[in-house]
Image (cartoon, helix red, strand yellow):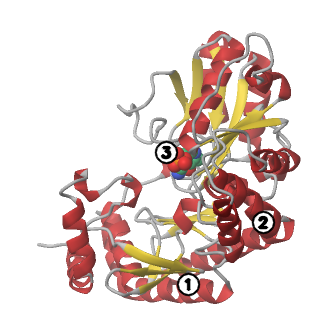
Amino acid sequence: MQTKLAGALEKAREQFEAANPRSRAAHATAAASMPGGNTRTTLYYSPFPLTMTCGDGCLLTDLDGHRYVDLLGDYTAGLYGHNNPVIRRAVHQALDRGWNYGAHGPDEARLAAVLCERFPGLDLVRFTNSGTEANLLALATATAHTGRRTILVFTGAYHGSVLTFADGDFPLNVPHRFAVAEYNDIAATAEVIDRHADDLAAILVEPVLGSGGSLPAAPSFLAHLRHQADETGALLIFDEVMTSRMAVGGMQELLGITPDLTTLGKYTGGGMTFGAFGGRADVMACFDPGRPGSLAHAGTFNNNVLSMAAGHAGLTELFGAEASGALFRRGESLRARLNEVSREHGAPMFWTGLGSMLTAHFQLGPIRSPRDLRPAPAQRELFHLDMLTRGFHLARRGMIALSLEVGDHECARFTAAVDEFLTEHTPTLVEAGKG
Ligand code: PMP
């Protein structure tokens, strides 16, 4: 006999397919020249992903003409929403001056100065083209600086397309000597560190596990990592590619824990292609090309004028202390409200997160580490397709990253949509949870 969940999912897929013939055709065409019609795996979902054609403020429009409230915010990169006039002006002005100088420009130093002023852990910073590249460079810096090889990472972590620790040994990972410990488990982590203490070059950690399910690190866990890095002589690296949005100086400012190196990306380049790594002056000094024996860090597009200009305009004109505080509070109250709605329905749905980063899980809370997570792919698909049909765009894995364009009105509408979803599907979710 078909379960309630399988039946509901079949119906949701049929509805989705019937409503989106143009996106379906676009996906079939794309599949002729890209594997699975896709060049960024995170954007794929079954039965086929929607093709978006236009973004404005907090709204997206797809090929079949539907409009969505964009709650995904490009997995945190879309902090400024779509088509923001400040970013648009900065990019236009940069274009007006021409690009690809093959030389220093005025904007990289301005952007670097703002970042170093804001992030307690940044004395000096360098730019890259993505968060992945920023982490690759930070790890290479740590191994070169310490003369050691082992990198401590955590279960469920995502530091880039070749630095993925979600499901054990990922075949595309770069061949560093990785040791993996359990996120938010001080005792187990201490044991792993003890085993590798003599060779430990770096501890790489997301202050909130982002792709791994929006799971915040306990402050005591991060304080412990700071302590153990000091004890062993390893460098503590905060991957703040996602979490830098929690305050103008990122999680390091909020927690008062200063890492040796920090990596950034996503919105920090104003929504253009971007990454950055930086930290202690004595560590980053190895990249000073004027010094004898310095290390070269090349990259044709490291100071590309669009990212430098857009990044600076976004940080200085749009994302100050007031805006970041308001965004954080909006996310906190949305998450509280969503969990209240789940509780009222007695539904196995729990929202984790911090500030403007949230993820829906189809189980009861609390959820502290990836170890607590139960896979629920069918529930996730049902929820995702249902929300798309109701006009809300979020990640298949249930992730939301509020942009500055999402207001109280959109949050209230989304909460009402989740309420309706649970009115219809709570018995289905309860039955599936028992299975
Ligand atoms: N680190 C974290 C924590 C991330 O979430 C991501 C991207 N989702 C990256 C690194 C990689 O950034 P990019 O996609 O720009 O390579």
The x, y position of residue 81, in whole percent, is 61, 73
Residue designated by label 1: 415
Q: Which residue occupies the foreground of this view, 345 or 210?
A: 210
Return the mark for residue 319: 2
Q: Which residue occupies the foreground of this view, 149 or 271?
A: 271
- Residue shown at 63% from the left, 61% from the top: 95
How far apart marks 2 and 3 lie (CA) works out to 35 Å
List the single residue furthest toward the right: 117
The x, y position of residue 37, in whole percent, is 26, 58
Q: Which residue occupies the foreground of this view, 213 or 408?
A: 408
Secondary structure at badge 1 equals: helix
In the rendered image, the vertical position of residue 294 relative to residue 87, given as above or below: above
Instruction: Give the quadrant of residue 170.
Output: top left
How far apart marks 3 and 1 lie (CA) works out to 28 Å
- Residue shown at 22% from the left, 81% from the top: 21
In what quadrant of the picture does the N terminus appear? bottom left
- Residue shown at 50% from the left, 43% from the top: 156
The x, y position of residue 330, in whole percent, is 71, 75
Return the mark for residue 371: 3
